[in-house]
Image (spheres, grey):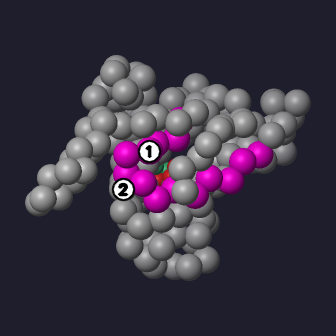
Amino acid sequence: MKPKKINVKNSGVVKLQCYEDFPDGNLVIAEARKNIPFTIKRVYIINNLFNKKAVRGKHAHKKLEQIIFCINGSFVLRLDDGKHKQRIAMNDPSVGIRLGPMLWHTMLNFSSDCVILVFASDWYDEKDYIRAYDEFKRLTT
Ligand code: TYD
């Protein structure tokens, strides 16, 4: 399922260019500062999601910009901007979701073959994380 409309703040859909007409497979293309709207300084992958009860994320960032993709399998992305919440089924490698600043996000319901790819606008910095939901609520309301 592709999200029709994103209702939370600091998010949105990023559609990548996709060639699906090759007899020997598909091609999906991401280009920094073109369809990825920032200079990519970090890329990370989440895989090996065999634990059916796994729940990842559960944090927000103060400044970081990220675009998240499900490049294989499926999972559910839950977004919360402090006022509005949205649940998005992720299952298309050419459809990314922007995880902008001050957006609480949770990933769950992973298929065992799920592979997640994230492009980030900056290097890892634990000081940019908000890991306590009550602190996030205090800062967003
Ligand atoms: P975290 O971002 O909380 O994981 P997720 O959102 O995927 O559930 O990171 C988990 C751990 O990995 C945490 O100890 C920080 C570390 N980490 C890095 O060192 N560098 C990174 O780029 C990321 C994303 C995490």
Toward the viewer: 55 or 2? 2
User: The N terminus lies in which quarter of the figure?
Assistant: bottom right
Q: Image point 33% across, 21% down: which residue?
A: 34
Tell whether 94 sits left or right of 82: left
Q: Is residue 15 magenta?
A: no
- Judge the density around disc 2: few (<14), some (14-19), many (≥20) Cα neighbours within 10 Å: many
How far across and down, in percent of the image, does residue 19 sit? 23, 44
Task: Report x, y in % for residue 123.
Answer: 40, 33
Residue 4 position (above or below residue 93) = above
| Amino acid marked by disc 1 | Val
Q: Name the residue under label 1.
A: 95
User: Which residue has dot 2 on it?
Assistant: 71
Q: Are marks 1 and 2 in contact (CB under 8 Å)?
A: no
Q: Report the side of 141 relative to 129 (left or right).
A: right
Total numbered labels placed on residues in the image: 2
Judge from the rendering whether residue 80 lies leftward or rightward of residue 53; answer left or right. right
Residue drawn where x is 53% and y is 63% of the image = 75
Image check: 44 left or right of 83? left
* Residue 53 - label: none
